[in-house]
Amino acid sequence: MPANHDEIRGAAHGTAPTPLSVLDLVTVGAGRTATQALRTSVDIARLAERRGYHRYWVAEHHSMPGVASSSPAVILAHLAAHTDRVRLGSGGVMLPNHAPLVIAEQFGTLEAMAPGRIDLGLGRAPGTDGATAAALRRTDRLNEGADDFPQQLAELTRFLDDDFPDGHRYSRIHAVPGPVQATSPGGVQDPHRPPLWLLGSSGFSARLAGVLGLPFAFAHHFSAQNTIPALDLYRESFQPSAVLDEPYALIGVSALATDDDGTEARRQVLAAALNMVRLRTGRPGLVPTPEEAEAHQFNEMERDFIDSWNSNVIHGSVDEVRTGLDDLQKRTGADELMLTANAHSGDVRLRSYDLIADAYGLPQS
C-alpha cells in the first residue's frame, strides 16, 4: 500500500531550514535508572509534539548499560499512549535480528494503536557486538543476515501488504493486525500501513533505498565522513516509486544546546564521548557524570578519539547550535534534521530540545 507523502515529508516550522525531528537512544546516566530514562523519553516526546518536531524515533541497541532502547516496539507503544500527534518510529529496527513476520506483527499492532503516526525504519547492522548479535539471531553466521537484507526487506513488505503470490510458501500466513482483516467475513481494516525507511551509515542502504524509491535516513551522528557520499549515492540511484516521486533524506545529528555560553554543553558532551571511548574499547557502561569525565586521565589515543568524535557534535550555546545546524543542512542538502542529544542528564537533554525550538521560533502548543 503506497504511503501518503505527507507521512514522509514533514513541514519546516518557524525559521528552521527543514523539518526537525528527534532520535532517542534512551540514555541512562550513572546514578540513574532505566525507569528514569524512560520517563525522560516520555517528557521529550511530549515536548517534541508540543513544539512542532515532526517525528520521534527510537533506536535499537543491545547489551549496552547506558542505552535502554533494546525494545523499540515496546517503547513506541508506551510513547503512543502519552502523545497524540507526533509521528513515532524506529530509527531503526535491525532487520537481520528479527523474523520479518514478527516485525510486521509488532508494527501492525503499533499502527492499530496510533493510526497514521507510525514509521518503520530498518537497518542491516546488528546494533551491538558480534557475540550479542549471535545470541539474538541464534547463529554465528552473522554475515548471512546482512547479505540477505534485500530479501528480508521484500519478505517484510509482503507481510505488511499481505500480498504473497499464490503458491508461495507464506501465501496462507498473515500478519495480524493487518490487511487480511479487511478480507475476512465481516472484516473492517484500515488499509494504511507504516511507511518503510531504510537506515544506513555507508553506501549499501543508500543505493538500495534509491533503487526502491524509499526514504533514506543516514547516521551522520556516528559516520559523518560518509554523509555526503551516501546522500549523493542515494540521489543518483533514486527511482520514482509509488512511495516517493523524488528523493527524501534525513540525517541524524548529535546536537546539544545549553542556556549558558556553552560551558555546560561542553561538559555534558565530554561525558558522552567518554562513554563512547569505553564502548569502542569493549567496556560499555552507564553514561558518566561530567565530573567523572573532567577527572578522567585521557591517554593520547583516547584524546584523539574524543577530539574526532566531538568535532561532529554540534554543541554549545543555542546560537552556536543553530548556526551549526544551518551550516550542516546547507552542506548536505538534507531534507530533514533528526537531532539526538547525548548527555548524562535527562534534564539537560530535555532543555536542549526546547532551546533549539526557541531558536527557530517553533510553535508553542
Image (cartoon, grey):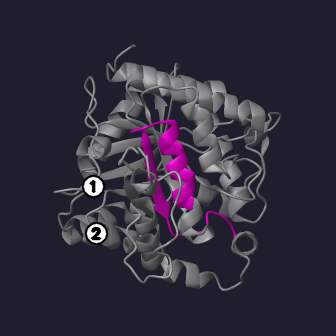
Residue with the mark numbered 2: 212
- Contact between labelled residues 1 and 2, with CB atoms less than 8 Å apart: no
Q: Is residue 308 visible?
A: no
SS at badge 2: helix
**Alpha-carbon distance for marks 2 and 1?**
12 Å
- Residue at the location (66% across, 48% down)? 69
Amino acid type for the residue under numbered disc 2: Leu
Residue range (magenta)? 103-129
350 with respect to 29 (left or right): left
Please tell me whether mark 2 or mark 1 is closer to you in this view: 1
As helix, strand or loop, the secondary structure at mark 1 comes to loop
Neighbor class of circle 2 (other Cα within 10 Å; few <14, some 14-19, many 20+) is some
Q: Residue at x 54, y 54 (%)?
A: 309
Is residue 189 positioned above or below 156 on the image? above
Specify which label sits upstream in the sequence, 2 or 1: 1
**From where the camera sits, is residue 164 visible?**
yes
Is residue 284 depicted above or below 30 in this figure?
Answer: below
Q: Quick check: 113 above or below 362?
A: below
Per the image, the residue denoted by label 1 is 2
Q: The N terminus lies in which quarter of the figure?
A: bottom left
Q: Percent x, y for residue 350? A: 57, 26
Q: Does residue 128 show up magenta in the picture?
A: yes
Question: Is 351 on the left or on the right of 345, as rendered?
Answer: left
Q: Position of residue 325 (x, y in %)?
A: 35, 39
Locate residue 203 relative to residue 274 in the image: left or right. left
Q: Position of residue 155 (x, y in %)?
A: 45, 73
